[in-house]
Image (cartoon, rainbow, N blue to C red):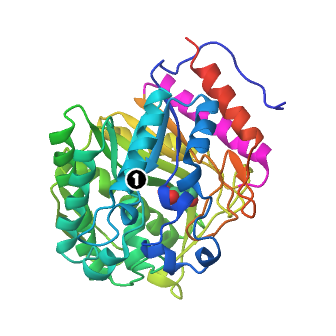
Amino acid sequence: MHSIKEQKNNNVFPPDFQWGVATSAFQLEGSPNADWTTWDPVLGDFPQITNHYDEFREDLKLLKDLGANSYRFSLEWSRIQPRPDTWDYEAIAHYQEIIDILRAYNIEPMVTLHHFTHPRWFLERSPWHRTTSIEKFLRYTEMMVSTLKNVRYWITFNEPYVVLIGGYLDGCMPPGLKDVPRSLVALKNIFTCHGKAYDIIHNYVPDARVSVAHNMSVFAPWKNWNPLDRLLKKSANYFYNHSIINAFQTGIFIVKFPFSRPVEIEVPIKDKLDFFGVNYYTRIHLRFNPFKKMGVELRYLDREGHGLTNIGWEVHPRGLAKVLRYASRLNLPLIITENGIASHDTEQKVKFMKQHVDVVERCLKNGLDVRGYYYWTLIDNYEWLQGLDARFGLYRVDFKTLKRSPTSAATYYAYLIQSRSRI
Ligand code: GAL
């Protein structure tokens, strides 16, 4: 039983609100041909991670048991196109089967084309800082959109800024570079792909709904009295939350790194969005520190007593309202494409979910056009920089036996969905 009191009636969630769960293919199933497979030594011992590639039918039943009406998942490009000139039709049929099962369960699929991983050949021959990346990604996109049936919701890129920061500035993700000029070329190429993929998808699926899933964050100065910390907060906010929204409105990215001149990059993405996908997790405190990379040190601080997660992130529910309000300047439907917590303590997970869904409820009451909430994630999985112990799942996975067991967060999410779907 949950110790949390529920409010009844006054349901503001519209009947077609998308109650979903989000996953990504690589984090559940690995892939022999992906760049990350050899990037992280942890995967040497767990190449199939949860073995979802074989057990997907059972996992989709878990999703159905929750009562979710939507499911966001990704296609593992490196399984589909293991070599530049080879399409693996069995892999494509595999993902089509997922879609067919979802449709049979009355669950709306939302398909992500790119969720961090690449085929190894792509990174070796046409990484994002080369112009050939565009043609390669669009070929893959067209192949998927022309082949997969019954998909209306498409996410082109999951967290493109994370790909750029992790892969090109911080070096903690493939291709592992720390190279500002190349990061700007990669940004142009990735968003050019989004713009063109948007058109390709609409050519094949006229009533498609297309977006990116952008991670929005709340930033705060580490020390409020310090003007440099405040300046960093402003710059981070501008870059993370504002520059992308502005680019979708104008077709121009304005990249301003602290203490340097702004760079303008033209990209063909003006109005190439049908909704805006927001991934939201936490608030980040920033401090100016000349001994750190780019002069920035970041921390997660438990300033309001909501606690930190198992991977140290601050739980900051009202930040969700803040980013949604900010994103609403796009005048488009908003979908929370990811929100979740890494915790071994399932009561903490339940509380996190309740607090964030309460915020969504308040946003709806205040007139924001929020159309969906996707909890991250269905079952415990591989978490990019934290390996196998981050525990975001509604269902717990024992990585030795691969057995899935429900946590009380699964029961609670099912209850939430049911009670909020009541008319
Ligand atoms: C997001 C990412 C997911 C997942 C989640 C939890 O940034 O899209 O793949 O890892 O964070 O950290």
Question: In the figure, 127 relative to 355: above or below?
Answer: below
The verdict on residue 121 being magenta is: no
Q: Is residue 94 visible?
A: yes
Say whether residue 50 is left or right of residue 229: right
Point out the stretch of residues depicted in magenta: 343-367
The quarter holding residue 356 reads top right
The quarter holding residue 276 reads top left
Q: Can you tell me whether the CB of the residue at mark 1 lies under 8 Å from the nearest atom of ligand 1?
A: no
The quarter holding residue 7 reads top right
| Image location of residue 411, percent across then percent down | 73, 33
Residue at the spot 50% in from the left edge and 23% down from the top edge: 365
Disc 1 secondary structure class: strand
| Image location of residue 243, percent across then percent down | 31, 58
Question: In the figure, 100 relative to 281: above or below?
Answer: above
On-image quarter of the C terminus: top right
Q: Which residue carries the number 1 mark?
A: 214
Residue at the spot 46% in from the left edge and 43% down from the top edge: 72
| Image location of residue 399, percent across then percent down | 71, 62
How many labels were placed on the picture?
A: 1
Residue at the spot 32% in from the left edge and 45% down from the top edge: 211
